[in-house]
Amino acid sequence: MVIYVIDDHPLMRDAVVMLLRRIRPGSEVVELSQLSDLDRVVAVKGAPELFCLDLKLPDTVGISGVKLLKGQYPDVPLAVISATPASDVEEWCREAGADVYIEKSAGAAEIASALRTMLLTDSQAGDLDDSDLKTETKLSKRQKQLIVMLDEGLSNRDIAERLGISEHTVKVHLWRLFRRLGVKSRTQTLHYARMNGLLNS
């Protein structure tokens, strides 16, 4: 499995690749400067495990790159890493299929933390609770914590402060939770949790 970093800015691309090689030693990381090269390179290098995508590429407009990647590879995790403020485009990116939106201004430590969490297997992300083995959906202790905090109405920032992690890492944990439950939003998560007895109250 291969991690693809698609960014036309050489310094930023190099920085993301360096972070990925540090957090996942031995993984093959492939760099691209434009999306139109992807099909040819995937045919040579192999199936993608993760995409790290810049929004502003020579051959994309707006969120077209997100739509294209998710159309071709709907099951491959996609992290958008962009200089555009999250308040401007994050919601559109998420609606188009991006799993996580990370601002380039977040800094190396936060970006690395978010990407590291995306690359963990479910069992690595949090030990599964044996008491849930009788249910079809097995949740980690962290995922159960998230459901409780969502029920309390906490924002990503509030959750980050309570858990002592970055907001970007919170977003990745929520992505894992949504994927595990087969939902797409906080509201759907809470509905699922109530319907399946995941909240005591």
Image (cartoon, helix red, strand yellow):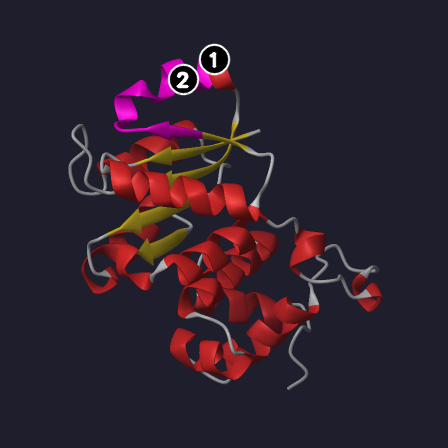
| Residue 53 visible in the snapshot | no
Q: In this view of the protein, which residue sits in the foreground, 13 or 189?
A: 13
Q: Quadrant of the C terminus?
A: bottom right
Pointer 2 local density, CA inside 10 Å: few below 14, some 14–19, many at least 20 = some
Q: Residue at x 42, y 62 (%)?
A: 110
Numbered range of the magenta stretch: 30-43
Q: Quadrant of residue 193?
A: bottom right
Relative to 83, is 31 on the left or the right?
right
Question: Helix, strand or loop at disc 1?
Answer: helix
Residue 156 x, y percent position in the rendering: 41, 74
Amino acid on which the number 1 mark rests in the picture: Val
Compared with residue 4, is residue 40 higher up or lower down, i.e. above or below? Answer: above
Q: Position of residue 103 (x, y in %)?
A: 29, 57
Q: CA distance from mark 1 to mark 2?
A: 5 Å
Asked whether the viewer can see residue 44, the reply is yes
The quarter of the displayed image where residue 8 is located: top left
Pick the residue in front: 192 or 120.
120
Q: Residue 60, how many percent across, how many down?
A: 19, 33
User: Residue 44, percent across and down?
Assistant: 47, 13
- Residue at mark 1: 44
The residue that disc 2 covers is: 41
